[in-house]
């Protein structure tokens, strides 16, 4: 039997304060990391530097994360989740897939530039961008591609890397072209693969 001191109401208040403290601490770490990412890539940011910037001690950081890339990956995956959730909602309303994705990216372009489509490729942001594009295309394309089973994986790799490369370049160019135009470009290139 678990020992319990104090009444349940005090325990709930303490837990609520701790949850609020956790949220505030994580928000401070996230905002600090975003500020530092504006200056340099994630693999050049140390825990010490991040904690000094956030004015927190390292033990506080290590209570939540193993290292800076773990925080970066969590933030990137949450951004990807929000994008994919948005695209899923749009898919229920329309058959158009690429344009809503690009509009969402454009509306959040700084976050995507810092966490997914940044100047400096890392294994972390490549994994996140691949996850986004793979989900957008869906695995159903595997059966629709007019290639032998041995060639399909190469065609899918081309789609993932090519589409991701186009979006990366677009974000790096500050999303100058309208999402509709970039969507037509991507969809046109994908369409050509189906005509092989």
Image: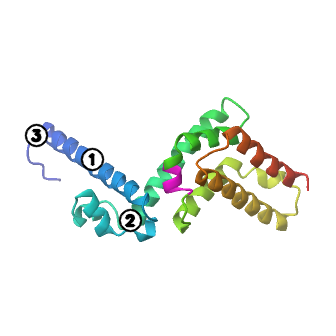
What label does residue 68 carry, if any? 2
Q: Residue at x 15, y 39 (%)?
A: 8
- Residue at the location (12% across, 40% down)? 10
Q: Give the residue number, with chain letter if any, for mark 1.
A: 24
Q: Nearer the viewer, residue 146 or 109?
A: 109
Per the rendered image, the range of residues in magenta is 111-117
Name the secondary structure under disc 2: helix
Q: In the shown orientation, is residue 45 left or right of residue 192?
A: left
Dot placed on the residue nearer the N-terminal end, 2 or 3: 3
CA gap between label 2 and label 3 equals 39 Å
Task: State the residue in front, 34 or 93.
Answer: 34
Q: Residues within 10 Å of mark 3 (few under 14, many from 20)?
A: few
Observer able to see residue 56: yes
Quarter of the image holding residue 95? top right
Q: Which mark is residue 126?
A: none
Residue 29 covered by magenta stretch? no
């Amino acid at each position: 039997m678990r020992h319990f001191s104090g009444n349940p109401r005090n325990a709930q208040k303490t837990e609520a304060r701790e949850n609020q403290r956790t949220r505030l601490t994580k928000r401070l770490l996230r905002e600090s990391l975003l500020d530092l990412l504006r200056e340099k890539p994630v693999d050049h940011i140390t825990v010490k530097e991040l904690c000094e910037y956030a004015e927190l001690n390292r033990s506080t950081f290590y209570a939540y994360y193993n290292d800076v890339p773990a925080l970066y990956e969590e933030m990137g995956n949450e951004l990807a989740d929000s994008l994919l959730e948005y695209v899923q909602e749009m898919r229920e309303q329309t058959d158009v897939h690429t344009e809503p994705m690009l509009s969402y990216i454009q509306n959040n372009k700084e976050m995507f530039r810092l966490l997914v489509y940044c100047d400096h490729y890392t294994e972390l942001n490549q994994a996140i961008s691949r996850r986004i594009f793979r989900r957008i295309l869906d695995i159903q394309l595997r059966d629709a591609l007019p290639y032998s089973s041995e060639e399909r994986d190469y065609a899918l790799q081309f789609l993932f890397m090519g589409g991701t490369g186009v979006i990366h370049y677009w974000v790096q160019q500050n999303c100058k072209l309208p999402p509709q135009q970039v969507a037509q470009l991507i969809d046109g290139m994908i369409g050509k693969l189906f005509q092989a």
